[in-house]
């Protein structure tokens, strides 16, 4: 009788999300990581020399937009209904 209860409890346990939700979540995390990689760099080795690359399109517009898109993808993966 105890074995039946354990088997029933194991069968009733379900994951919080479906597999597709986890795949979308991982894609969102990868997009966020890509955005942070795009933001990196642009510093100067010499503190007396100013490097204009800090204000490039990639670091000011593209990277933050990529991070926000990644956050949107992860939020979508959380709110997507399971079938």
Image (spheres, helix red, strand yellow):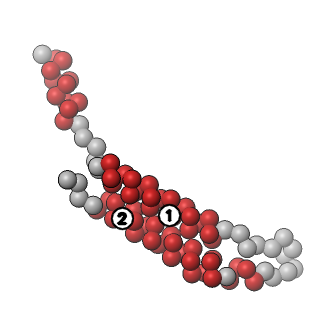
Instruction: Spot the residue most to the left.
Output: 1
The reply, left or right, for residue 68 in relation to residue 49 is left
Toward the viewer: 67 or 20?
20
Q: Quadrant of the N terminus?
A: top left
Residue 75's disc number: 2
Q: Residue 23 location, x and y as percent?
A: 39, 53
User: Residue at left 40%, top 69%?
Assistant: 72
Q: Which mark is residue 31?
A: 1
Quadrant in which residue 3 is drawn: top left
> Where residue 29 sits: x, y (%)?
47, 59
Q: CA distance from mark 1 to mark 2?
A: 13 Å
Give SS at disc 1: helix
* Picture residue at 34% right of the left edge, 60% below the top: 77
Sequence order check, earlier mark of 1 and 2: 1
Give the residue drawn at x 23%, y 54%: 82
Q: Secondary structure at mark 2?
A: helix
Q: Which disc is residue 62 wearing?
A: none
Q: Nearer the viewer, mark 1 or mark 2?
A: 1
- Image location (x, y in percent) of residue 31: 50, 64
Viewer-closest of 56 and 48: 56
Taking the image as shown, residue 44 lies to the left or right of residue 62, namely: right
């Amino acid at each position: 009788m105890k074995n039946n209860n354990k088997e029933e409890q194991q069968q009733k346990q379900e994951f919080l999300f479906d597999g597709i939700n986890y795949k979308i979540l991982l894609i969102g995390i990868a997009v966020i990581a890509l955005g942070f990689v795009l933001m990196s760099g642009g510093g100067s080795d010499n503190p007396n020399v100013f490097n204009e690359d800090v204000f490039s399109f990639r670091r000011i517009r593209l990277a933050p937009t990529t991070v926000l898109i990644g956050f949107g993808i992860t939020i979508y993966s959380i709110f997507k209904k399971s079938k």
